[in-house]
Amino acid sequence: MTTIYNYSLILKGMNKEFAKIEFQELWSLYFNEKIKLKQTENTLFQFSSKFLIKSTHKLLERLTFTNFISLNIYKFKTIEELKQNISSLDLNKYDGKYFRVRVKKSKRTHKAKFTEKLLAGVIWDNFKKPKVSIDKPDV
């Protein structure tokens, strides 16, 4: 069974069509996979891929019209829902690797009740040897 990864992407608003083309073409170049960006808000897009991108991937250096890319693991409304979702994941392959959590707010979520520290704490509790790196995370 192939794992499908869901991503969110914030493009620069000055020329969204050009930004979409840039991202799709570079993704195709680096991963040999065609993706379709679905617009969910003004500059917020989502897409799915069979590839997991690392924070050190060369593609990220080439993006000119992309402000942000993130991997969507789960949607949740309470910390308890997040804890249940994370406890069902097999995190062994990430144990001992550096991670970081970023909260990006949009117009719809500008009053987010979850802080990066709170979310990182939930993840931290699920690792045997947790490590955090703000500058160069592995995950």
Image (tube, helix red, strand yellow):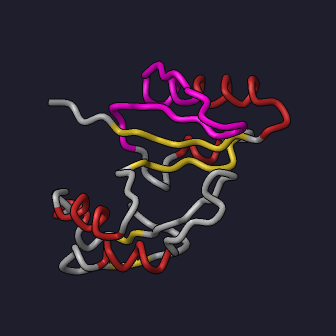
Residue 134 or 123: which is nearer the viewer? 123
Q: Which residue does the image show at 61% across and 30% down from the upper left?
A: 39
- Residue 51 falls within the magenta-colored stretch: yes
Position of residue 100 in the picture relative to residue 67 (left or right): left
Residue span colored magenta: 26-52
Q: Is residue 137 above or below residue 129?
A: above
Q: Position of residue 83 (x, y in %)?
A: 26, 68
Q: Residue 122 location in percent, x, y?
A: 32, 75
Q: Residue at x 24, y 36 (%)?
A: 3
Q: Is residue 14 magenta?
A: no
Rendering coords of residue 64 (x, y %): 73, 41
**As displayed, is residue 17 above or below residue 55?**
above
Q: Residue at x 57, y 66 (%)?
A: 112
Picture quadrant where residue 93 is located? bottom left
Of residues 54 and 41, the one drawn nearer to the viewer in this rendering: 41
Figure label count: 0
Question: In which quadrant is the N terminus drawn?
Answer: top left
Name the residue at 69% across, 48% down.
67
Q: Please state if 1 lies on the left or on the right of 45 as rendered.
A: left
Query: In terms of image quadrants, where is residue 111?
Result: bottom right
Please determine whether, in this image, residue 31 is positioned above or below residue 130: above
Residue 126: % across, % down = 22, 73
